[in-house]
Amino acid sequence: MSTSPGLKYIKTIREFELTDKVVFLRLDLNVPIDGGKITDETRITASLPTIKYAVDRGAKLVLASHLGRPKTKDDIQFSLEPVAQRLSELLGMEVLLVEEPKSNAAKALLAGLKKNQIILLENLRFEPGETKNSDEFASILASYCQIYINDAFGASHRAHASIEALPRMMKEKGIGFLIEKEIQILDQLLENPARPYLAILGGSKVSDKIGVIEKLIDVVDTFIIGGAMAYTFLKARGVPVGKSLVEADKVAYAKEMMARIEARHKSLILPQDHIVTADFKSGRGELCTQQAIADNMMGVDIGPKSLGACEAAIRGAKTIFWNGPMGVFETEVFSKGTFGIAKAMAESKAPMRIVGGGDSAAAAEASGYASQMTHISTGGGASLEYLQGDKLPGLEILRNRRPSVEAKL
């Protein structure tokens, strides 16, 4: 059983009286923008239920988010202006973008805020104090807010000012509907999964997945390992992998991990064939029908035989957790393995089909099967850290600990 504290002692937005209260709503509106156009608005739509709930109950809303990793305020390609415009369209409200969160502009706007208006602060990371978890920056934000609600699951593993320092200063604090749903689903993966339970792990590095493998090894029934990280495992088995990406310092770990999986009578599925290329940039690939890869070639996707084995495992599973693509899916020639996994999951009758955020969420969207998943996490790094048992600063600061006297009763 998991020892995850879940949502213990954390209030949800339902537990607050919101009418005429100024609510600081920390969201994850970190969406991809190309040429001023939003290319994937999943995180925006995921935030709408909490926003609408607060609006319907008469709250005065101050929305806040980061976008990308700007170095200075002059990095205008990281402005939240396109997000403000899209929110306005989706909500049918006027979204007022405050360019200087540290100024008195937000306070002045709040004084005369109309029913059909909400405030959105400009990209928090334009302020150096945000990533430094600055008390000074947080205290400015706290000075005009009465209730703090975090619904930014994808940022909750960061100890930043709007995630950790600000709620530390607020008496009234809790979470929105998105975080509530994310944690409830992740807890099911740890504590009460329907069996057989299948974990599909991909991506480039074994080192990124060590923590989650360690946490799941006693819970999961079958592991599928694909993507570049699979070549480290194949190398550990003595299989030639050519020029494929290998983490040399993790080969011994991969060997030990495979022995532990076998000792627990779990199943492990590794690629049996591959799509390979001599030159990654050429965008050309060819099928390697065996597990061994020639010295001058590198693996960039799983082959059809491997995909068939994955599909069979997916069909037999009742709980499926997928984190990490099977290949370089952004290049069409190398996308068949990843999109095949998405299709098989979408067609599965498993009651729990969870995509663990990050590149996997992007792959699910690109495949066209995202809407058929049980849940797609909005937080790649946050969901992995939570699953591997790490405490998320954005959640821990919201726990209203019981008084010691009550705890003894």
Image: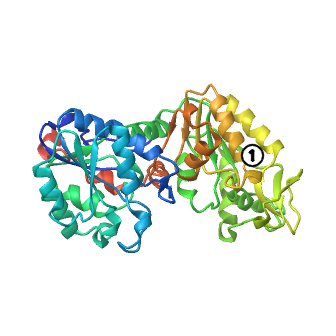
| Residue at 69% over, 34% down | 344
- Amino acid carrying mark 1 in the image: Lys
Quadrant of res 231? bottom right
Q: Residue at x 34, y 56 (%)?
A: 65
Query: Is 345 drawn above or below residue 278 in the view shown?
Result: above
Quarter occupied by the C terminus: top left
Residue 144 visible in the displayed image: no
- Which residue is at 38% across, 73% downward? 74
Where residue 387 appears, as percent x and y from the top left, is 47, 48
Give the number of marks. 1
Element class at badge 1: helix
Locate residue 61, reporting x and y percent: 22, 46
- Give the residue at mark 1: 336
Q: Residues within 10 Å of mark 1 (few under 14, many from 20)?
A: many
* Left or right: 390 in relation to 332: left
Where is residue 19? Give x, y as percent: 13, 36
Q: Answer whether residue 213 is visible to the viewer in this image.
A: yes
Q: Residue at x 18, y 66 (%)?
A: 103
